[in-house]
Image (cartoon, rainbow, N blue to C red):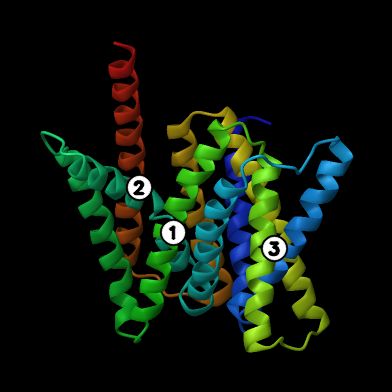
Amino acid sequence: MSASWLIVAATFLFASMGVCVKLASSHYGAGEIVFYRGLTGVLMVWFYTRRSGGSLRTALPAMHFWRSLTGVLSLALWFYAIGHLPLATAMTLNYMSSVWMALFLLGGAVLLGASRVDYRLVATVLAGFAGVAMILRPTIEQDQLWHGVIGLLSGMLAAMAYLQVTALGRAGEPDHRVVFYFSLAGAVAGGASMLWTGASPHDLRGLLLLVAVGVLATTAQMLMTRAYRTGRVLVNASLQYLGIAWAFVYGVLLFDDPVTALALGGMLLIVGAGLAATLLRQEVATNNQHTSES
């Protein structure tokens, strides 16, 4: 399967996972959902590795630790936001990760004493946050601003985790090993939160939803990771925003989420800012490479 179709499939699976998380949130806390998502992922990747003859032993435990720390925090905040916000809103705020990476790039340039600031990056960041304000405007009236801030923070941490995944890939770590240690960290962190808050009682519907979250998320993560290894970054980033469209359709059909012109405009603004940020990051990386070669 080509990288483009891998991304399309992954976005659909992630949006479907969001539906299961939202349904499960009426009975389970975010920490519990993270635990079962991580446990399912650990079992799936372990089985896949055993069948394929691979290895889970790593020489980069510190890098996996920091990637897992930011990734699990982002996941827990995202699951919390999904449980309290319209599905497409929570999904879009998490997809702000590309804009956050542009902000990190801009901040790094300032700290390193760059002679001039790339005002295209500044415009991209401002456009992204303007989109956030437009999306949250309908929810502010429902006293859900705090949940929106949580969703926004999940996107920031997702950006940090993505940068660390990129570093692990450059260091030669295979896809399954990155996903395994992230899932393991989720199971440990989620289990620790359950010791603090207690575990909810199960029924068949709840268990099926928890298993579905783990299976859908792990499969989507493997597909997405492979696509970014083999496909073009800008094409992948463009198709990745299909996740917002899937979530929007799910939200309207299953949860009667409100449709407002302001929120739709905000989503489009964030998508545009995210694509622009990806293009500018590629340009900066190319320029840096040419500079080092010369």
Q: What element carries label 1?
A: helix
Identify the image quadrant of the C terminus. Answer: top left
Residue hosting label 1: 157
In the rendering, which numbered label is found on residue 38? Answer: 3
Question: How far apart are the two marked residues, 1 and 3, measured between alpha carbons?
Answer: 18 Å
The disc, 1 or 2, on the residue closer to the chain's N-terminal end is 2
> Which of the 4 image quadrants contains residue 228?
top right
Q: Which amino acid, mark 2?
A: Met
Q: Residue at x 87, y 43 (%)?
A: 50
The residues bearing labels 2 and 3 have C-alpha atoms spaced at a distance of 26 Å
Residue located 62% across and 84% down the image: 26
Residue with the mark numbered 2: 101
- Label 2 packing within 10 angstroms: few (<14), some (14-19), many (20+): many
Q: Which residue type carries mark 1?
A: Leu
Q: Which structural element holds mark 3?
A: helix
Q: Which of 181 and 100 is in front in this view?
A: 181
Would you call the spot at circle 3 few (<14 residues within 10 Å), some (14-19), or many (20 or more)?
many
Q: In the image, what residue type sits under mark 3?
A: Gly
Q: Give the mark nearer the N terminus: 1 vs 3.
A: 3
* Residue 59 position within the rendered picture, expressed as x and y whole percent measured from the top left: 66, 39
Q: Is residue 5 above or below residue 135?
A: above
